[in-house]
Image (cartoon, rainbow, N blue to C red):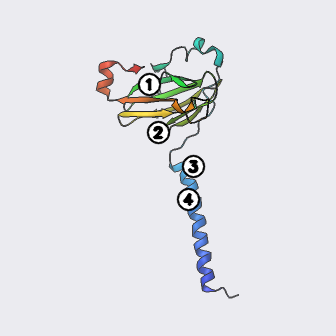
Amino acid sequence: MHVHRYEKLWFGAALLLIVLFIATVVFGAVGAGIQMIDDEAGTVDPSNLSEHPRFSETGVVESDDADTDYEVRIVAYHPTYAPTTVTVPVDSTITFYLTSGDVIHGFDMVGTNVNAMVIPGQVTSFTVEFDETGEYDFICNEYCGPQHHIMEGAVEVVSQEEWNSDGGGDS
Ligand code: CUA
């Protein structure tokens, strides 16, 4: 069977494209450091968060867990987060615990790979380490009501010296 030279060329180019497409999918799945958030952090009663051992005290809390330095506990209520701003030290392991007191919200930290849903009744948990100081803004990226567009907050990452001098915290 004779295959025309141009046909062979296109055949090769098409195969190359398929390999490249598979490579981009594989890179997106394993190479880009993307981790899915599971339901391991458990469930809560959204109407009784003030009694909950974790969400009765929101903000930055020193962690009892050996694998993490600080916990950041945030409750989303339309159209805000409680607390709105948290301060954490650089180069520390920070585990976020998020939940909602009303409807589904988002928690998208601009310029980072943090992007989570905040669901009433469910605890969203993920661990991050900030290796650069600065202000990391987060926004709600799930439509949650008429004031959705103003729902935002920030994580301020300060140097270890600054953290030790003012004790960190939230506002
Ligand atoms: Cu909360 Cu949109």
> On the image, numbered disc 1 is attached to which residue?
85
Between disc 1 and disc 4, whose residue precedes?
Answer: 4
Please state which of residues 121 and 68 is positioned toward the viewer in this rendering: 121
The mark lying in front, picked from 4 and 2, is 2
Residue 133 image offset from top left, x and y in percent: 35, 34
Residue position for label 4: 23
Q: Which mark is residue 110?
A: 2
- For the N terminus, the quadrant is bottom right
Q: Quadrant of residue 165?
A: top left
Left or right of residue 100, residue 159 in this image: left
* Residue at the limit of the structure toward the top, as seen here: 51
What kind of element bears circle 3? helix
Give amino acid for label 2: Val
Give me the C-alpha separation between circle 1 and circle 4. 39 Å
* Residue on which the image places disc 3: 29
Q: In the rendered view, tell whether residue 77 sits above or below residue 34.
A: above
Quadrant where ligand 1 appears? top right
Crowding at dot 1, Cα within 10 Å, few <14 / some 14-19 / many 20+, comes out as many
Residue located 65% across and 16% down the image: 47
Disc 4 is placed on an element classified as helix
In the rendered image, the vertical position of residue 144 relative to residue 28, given as above or below:
above
Q: Point out the image quarter for the C terminus.
A: top left
> Nearer the N terminus, badge 4 or badge 2?
4
